[in-house]
Image (cartoon, rainbow, N blue to C red):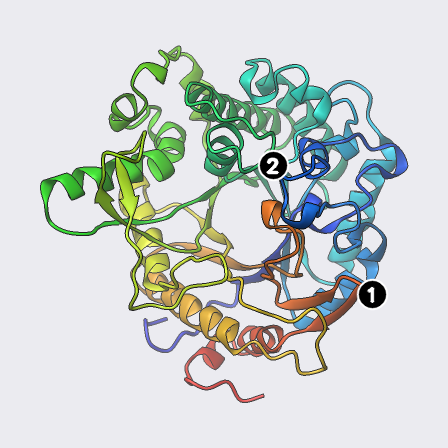
Amino acid sequence: MTGDDFLFPESFLWGAATSAYQIEGSPLADGAGPSIWHRFSHTPGLVRDDDNGDVACDHYRLWKSDVALMRDIGLTAYRFSISWSRVLPEGTGRVNQAGLDFYLRLTDALREAGIRPFATLYHWDLPAALDDRGGWLNRDVAGWFADYAAVAYRALDDRVESWATLNEPWVVADGGYLSGALAPGHRNLFEMPLVSHNLLRAHGAAVQAYRALSSRPAVGIVVNIEPKYPASSNPEDLAATRRADAYMNRQYLDPVFLGRYPEELPEIFGQAWPDFPSSDFDAIRSPLDFLGVNYYTRGVMRADAAYVPLRSVRVRQKQHAHTETQWEVYPEGLADVLRWVRKSYGNFPLYVTENGAAFYDPPSVGASARDPLRVQYLREHLRAAGRAMADGVDLRGYFAWSLLDNFEWSHGYSKRFGIVHVDYATQKRTPKQSARFYTKVIGTRGAALTPDVFEE
């Protein structure tokens, strides 16, 4: 393919993504245990409008019609996450077969519909019972996670196409343990590097657990990468940009691929930076089969000593559109990220495991469910992915975030990312204009990306 014709390979996977707590609902059904997100969302004042995931999209009961909807859109892959506490209510020990059975039924239905299941083992919903034992601050969590992963592997590996160990460890650590905006809601600079390190140790242990059970090349990790650009050529801004990149991006990729942390991290964390055992990196660096990249926006950075620990601040780019979450729409950042991964870590199999935008959609919609801004967002980001592939990036697939409007963490139900509209009062699903556009893109292997106007 070239950067202009956008004909994706026949083998390219066209998917959409979700996560368990955001769509399933019924979080305590059939013997499941509570997660930290169940606790967090039931604590008054922590989630907008005191929303929670008790019902969400009711996918736990409506999964059959949701799979049919995926088939109708034309998806060839579907990325979902497994609820750890649905499978292991106490986080360790006793397996809840009813919880496993839900994922057995789901993956069977996906395969029958010609849709390849991509499973994520951890999408932020740690069992509350393990949080009571220290959670991600306890070094034992790596073993707990590996044991849980082995349960999932043994039950589902004959059905699941690929396994991701973790989703966005930076968000888990930064949002959950530094800013407090996400579960479990801690605000402690000293905790964050410990949590990040234990997440990576758990990832490595889960990779090793997979290698002990299967020879398939089917395990990786998903990271959110936000390319950082300096606001000016001043040395202070350049240094601030390097710190921001090390903190958000390289903190999770350098250990996995290079077996070490970026040199900027001790400077960033100061006294809060621990001295980690060198032996930990043997597991963290366990070879992967793919890397999942979640891309939403970029950061243009300026030095500012008032913002600690990074001593840098994002500069809003007023010349570009912004989403409902105030993220700049910058499609070329996706191409830049994919090229950067190839240059920094080698020509490795990649997937865009999340890419999407929250734009305003009304609570109820008619049959047309028009969302032209999201259509344009998908078009331009897929074009950017095509340009990266033309430059030699080994990109194997793309997953739109999200299949459904859903519980958007601390935003509650106020932000809609779905290509399918969900009326939360009735649970009615309505494919949006963006879903219909995506169907045409899939059916033409990307040729439908070339017109500037989408004709329905």
User: From what the image shows, is residue 203 above or below residue 226?
Assistant: above
Q: In the image, residue 175 lies at what x, y percent?
A: 50, 36
- Pinpoint residue 417: horizontal percent, then vertical percent: 58, 61
85 and 211: which one is in front? 85
Number of the label disc, if any, that sits on residue 353: none
- SS label for mark 2: loop
Vertical order, 63 against 265 (above or below)? below
Please identify the quarter of the rendering in which residue 426 is found. Answer: bottom right
Tell me which corner region of the image, top left, top right, bottom left or bottom right, holds residue 428: bottom right
Residue wearing tag 2 = 124
What percent of the width, then of the height, locates residue 309?
32, 29
Q: Which residue is mark 1?
A: 426
Residue at 35% in and 55% down: 393
The foreground one among 345 and 33 is 33
Q: Against 383, is 317 above or below?
A: above
Q: Earlier in the sequence, mark 1 or mark 2?
A: 2
Q: Residue furthest bottom?
A: 455
Q: Is residue 245 left or right of residue 326?
A: left
| Secondary structure type for disc 1 | loop
Quarter of the image that includes the C terminus? bottom right
Q: How many marks?
A: 2
Mark 2 Cα-neighbour bin, 10 Å: few <14, some 14–19, many ≥20: many
- The percent position of residue 242, horizontal first and vertical second, equals 23, 38
Going by the numbered disc 2, the residue's amino acid type is Trp
Does residue 454 appear to the left or right of 394 in the view shown? right
The answer to whether mark 1 and mark 2 are in CB contact below 8 A is: no
Q: Is residue 322 left or right of residue 112?
A: left
Query: Residue at point 73% right, 28% down?
Result: 151
Q: Is residue 441 above or below residue 58?
A: below
Looking at the rendered structure, the kind of residue marked 1 is Thr
